[in-house]
Image (cartoon, rainbow, N blue to C red):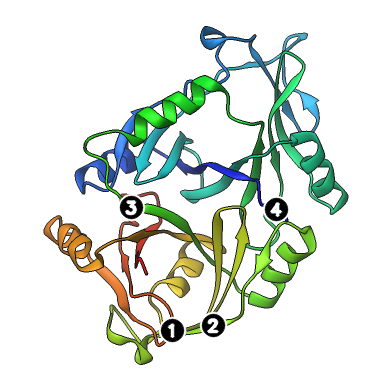
Amino acid sequence: MESNWELNHIGLVARDWNKPLDYYQSVAAGVSVGPQPVYLDLVGGGPVTFYSYGKPRTAGSQPRLYRFLDKDCQIGSLQLELTQNDSVEVEGINHICFNVPDIKGETAKLVEKGCEVILSFEQDDTIIENYLDTREFGSLILSLRCPQRKWEKAWKAHNLAHPLLSDWRFYGVGVAVRDLDKAVGYYQSLGIAALGPEIMLDSSALEGGSVSGTTVRARTRTAQIGPVAYEFVQPLDGEAVYRESLGSRGEGVSDLAFTVDDLERETAKLDERAVPVVLSGKPQTGSAFAYFDTRESGGNIMIRLLQAE
């Protein structure tokens, strides 16, 4: 695995992108930072050509030119990219994007492993971004971008300086899967993940634990891809959190996880804004945590906060 991959953003698709954007602002979890100022001829470079499965999308006889259309929400240190598709069957996280030093080389490695390039964007004969199909287990697309340009770095730094931004530090994603062994085996086969040991999540064994619904038991294992933890979870018993996620949307990202300096204080803030806790407690090993139910308005995903050690 290459340790020099950098997280660019996490992509969420919604039927109405204003709904999660407004929601995260209303509970003081995130702030709107507008569309990304990237790939536009206004900031240098020509227009972007859009390719689907290796073939240029055409308008008549000309390749389709692409302008980035999104809204972005800064949640702590995480840039959440919101795209709108009013016909999407299931709202939620559909891709994670990394900046890599050698986009051609990293793409070639994954193609050799059987991943197909499903979308690609080129500007001035340079690959800007490739979307690789890694949805076999966990239903997550991997997106690779070229290194950040000067103006993109400046935009991100400006967002992080927003006076209303929380100090949450992005940790990773919780991914509900039906077969833990197959999911982690798949990511291991791609050669991009460092795997941690298997850990049992048992709500009945949590110190000071609370759960909305029945007792939760699940197998978990974390794959580290660059700076992002993919925590794969196979539910065994109980209806809360991951089993509900599998039932409502199938395999995929069920939560965004952040570390915080004071979990009790952050929990109290969200409680004041009527954001309910679904599961919380302190395991015998590891950090205290709390899952907050932001699914209805937050794009079918929860927020998980972890006490920083």
Q: Earlier in the sequence, mark 2 or mark 3?
A: 3
Query: As drawn, is 100 to the left or to the right of 261?
Result: right
Query: On residue 172, which mark appears?
Result: none
Query: Mark 3 or mark 4: which comes first in sequence?
Result: 4
In space, the residues marked 2 and 1 are separated at their CA atoms by: 9 Å
Residue 24 located left or right of residue 176: left
Q: Disc 1 on helix, strand or loop?
A: loop
Query: Which of label 1 and label 4 is nearer to you?
Result: 1
Residue designated by label 1:
285
Pair 4/2: label in front: 2
What secondary structure is found at the residue carrying circle 4?
loop
The kind of residue on which mark 1 rests is: Thr
Name the residue tied to disc 4: 134
Report the residue marked by disc 2: 199
The x, y position of residue 253, in whole percent, is 51, 59
Identify the mark nearer the N-term, 1 or 4: 4
Q: Are marks 2 and 1 in contact (CB under 8 Å)?
A: yes
